[in-house]
Amino acid sequence: DHLSLHAYCFERVAEFAERPCLIDGATDKTYNFAEVELISRKVAAGLAKLGLQKGQVVMLLLQNCIEFAFVFMGASILGAVVTTANPFYKPHEIAKQAKAAGARIIVTQAAYVDKLADLQSDDMIVIAIDGAPKEGCQHISILTEADETQCPSVEIHPDDVVALPYSSGTTGLPKGVMLTHKSLVSSVAQQVDGENPNLYFHSEDVILCVLPLFHIYSLNSVLLCALRAGAATLIMQKFNLTTLLELIQRYKVTVAPIVPPIVLEISKNPIVSQYDVSSVRIIMSGAAPLGKELEDALRERFPKAIFGQGYGMTEAGPVLAMNLAFAKEPFPVKSGSCGTVVRNALIKILDTETGESLPHNQAGEICIRGPEIMKGMAFSLN
């Protein structure tokens, strides 16, 4: 009796209806929760009108923007699948992923439409979120201004795929990682739900979204977790330290999910001391390990913030371990630790030679089991 991803993320939307949900850092345009839920339903109706059906794929080829959230949630409502791609990929890399995933619609920015020349066949629909539409390209309003009452009613099973991010995993070329409604609902719940959530977000929070939404870390632990918790997501199109500090000061950002290269930039640049960053209560770093020296340097810059790391991988939906310093009732955590395994999941460390489970403080292969794990890998959904 799992909820679908959109039903779960919007479950408490009435409670937060008038609260800010998505903020565009570049324009200050703000959408509240009621508006985001409504536009997501409009997008679902618009996708259906373009012929997209349950189980079919839409590709998001976007830098961070509010439309990313609208289309991702709209596709979920329709029972469709979203594959995300880095807009800085070369045309042949984009084409390869779009074909492998079986994408029927690509939503992108006008600046990247030319990269899709190889794909613009009769059956591929390209939609731009900005600018005057180029030839053979439609405008995002075809989705965001559709009639939400025309959205077909779709029965969604917990094991239906909702996201198809690409990961190179351990070997070879990138492969599609099939994340289901159950995978992502479980992963978000493991982080932000319960009496004492491991990652304590609440409706007064403003969460910085500077990490690319086409990566699962930002998509899950920023956007989806914020939607579920009733927190505001402040969207930055790309990283720029001055802009980031201005936004933290202006919007009183409380949670800053970042990665080690951003930590490095913050810790070595004296400009940080010119801004009021006292609102930040949590700084979480992921995607790569962070050394103690950088951790300590960051703490000096943000003396009021709790700092910690998490660990995950796309194939695990993505969070495997989370620092308990972020919990509603926090635990002290050693510097450099990426925390403990998330709730309702099991972890063991195996000896790679013998396959035996290892005791504490032994190096080996990490094995994880839980409802958040991917359904499997796919070169194509068929």
Image: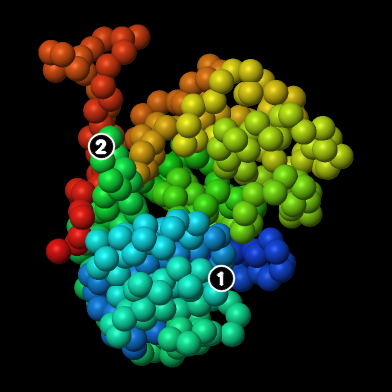
- Is residue 75 something that shows in the picture? no
Residue 248 versus residue 237 in the image, above or below = above
Which circle marks residue 171 in the picture?
Answer: 2
**Would residue 157 be found to the left or right of residue 340 on screen?**
left
Residue 172 versus residue 60 in the image, above or below = above
The image quadrant of residue 347 is top left
Secondary-structure class at tag 1: helix
The residue nearer to you, when weighing 277 against 83, is 83
Q: Which of marks 2 and 1 is nearer the N terminus?
A: 1
**Would residue 100 be found to the left or right of residue 212 on screen?**
left
Q: Residues within 10 Å of mark 1 (few under 14, many from 20)?
A: few
Residue at image position (48%, 73%) is 113
Residue 183 versus residue 50 in the image, above or below = above
How far is mark 2 from mark 1, CA to CA? 32 Å
Quadrant of the image containing the C terminus:
bottom left
Q: Name the residue under label 1.
A: 111
What type is the residue that disc 1 sits on?
Ala
Residue at image position (28%, 25%) is 366
**Would residue 138 be found to the left or right of residue 93 on screen?**
right
Rendered location of residue 64, percent (x, y): 55, 60
* Outermost residue to the right: 274
Secondary-structure class at tag 2: loop
Rendered location of residue 295, percent (x, y): 62, 23
Residue at image position (82%, 42%) is 276
Residue 82 versus residue 273 in the image, above or below = below
Q: How crowded is mark 2: few (under 14 residues within 10 Å), some or many (20 or more)?
A: few
The residue nearer to you, when weighing 88 against 232, is 88
